[in-house]
Amino acid sequence: MKGTCAWASVMLVALMGVLLGGLSGCAPTRPPTVPTPPEAAPVPPPPPSVQAAPALARDWREYHRLAAQQLVKANPGRTYLSEVPEPLKGIPILEVELNADGSVRQIKVQRRPRPADAQHTTQLAIEAVRRAAPFPPV
């Protein structure tokens, strides 16, 4: 596959806006639930084993799809798989530049959320990208 890492970062800018919509700082619309009593202490997960080699994409469209799937998998409950609700569209937009091996070279903030009470979501979005890394090789 030919191309540059910068091109991959352009593809991920739009991806971040859609997938990380769940990271906005809006207050929940439903009343808070009563916490349930704690159960037995959870068993810590086993140490990470050697990761299976990521799937290789045949083209940029497939790479974009694989990166999106990886972001969703690494951030369950924090991503949207359908249209993002209107109040959540004031989310940060990131430009993610990758190395050839799929590791994150750098993350630039392209747009910060406008509401002052949602500024913390920029760091949440950056952390979400780092949790999902490394991405498939570019």
Image: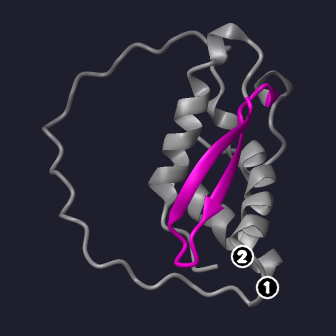
Residue, x 17% and y 51% (percent of image)? 44
Q: Position of residue 106 (x, y in %)?
A: 57, 53
Residue, x 48% and y 67% (percent of image)? 134
Q: Position of residue 86 (x, y in %)?
A: 86, 26
Q: Position of residue 104 (x, y in %)?
A: 53, 60
Answer with left or right where residue 36 lies relative to residue 100: left
Q: Position of residue 10 (x, y in %)?
A: 79, 59
How far separated are the C-alphas under marks 1 and 2?
A: 6 Å
Residue 20 in the magenta stretch? The answer is no
The span shown in magenta is 89-111
Residue 27 visible here: no
Answer with left or right where residue 36 lies relative to residue 135: left
Residue 98 in the magenta stretch? The answer is yes
Residue, x 77% and y 46% (percent of image)? 18
Instruction: Work out which quarter of the rendered image holds the N terminus and state it.
Output: bottom right
User: What type is the residue that disc 2 sits on?
Assistant: Tyr
Q: Which mark is residue 79?
A: none
Above/below status of 39 relative to 15: above
User: What type is the residue that disc 1 sits on?
Assistant: Asp
Above/below status of 17 relative to 46: above
Q: Which mark is residue 63?
A: 2
126 and 24: which one is in front?
A: 126
Magenta span main SS: strand
Which structural element holds mark 1? loop
Residue topped by disc 1: 59
Residue 97 visible here: yes
Which structural element holds mark 2? helix
Based on the displayed image, in which of its 4 quarters is residue 65 positioned? bottom right
Answer with left or right where residue 138 lies relative to residue 35: right
130 and 5: which one is in front?
A: 5
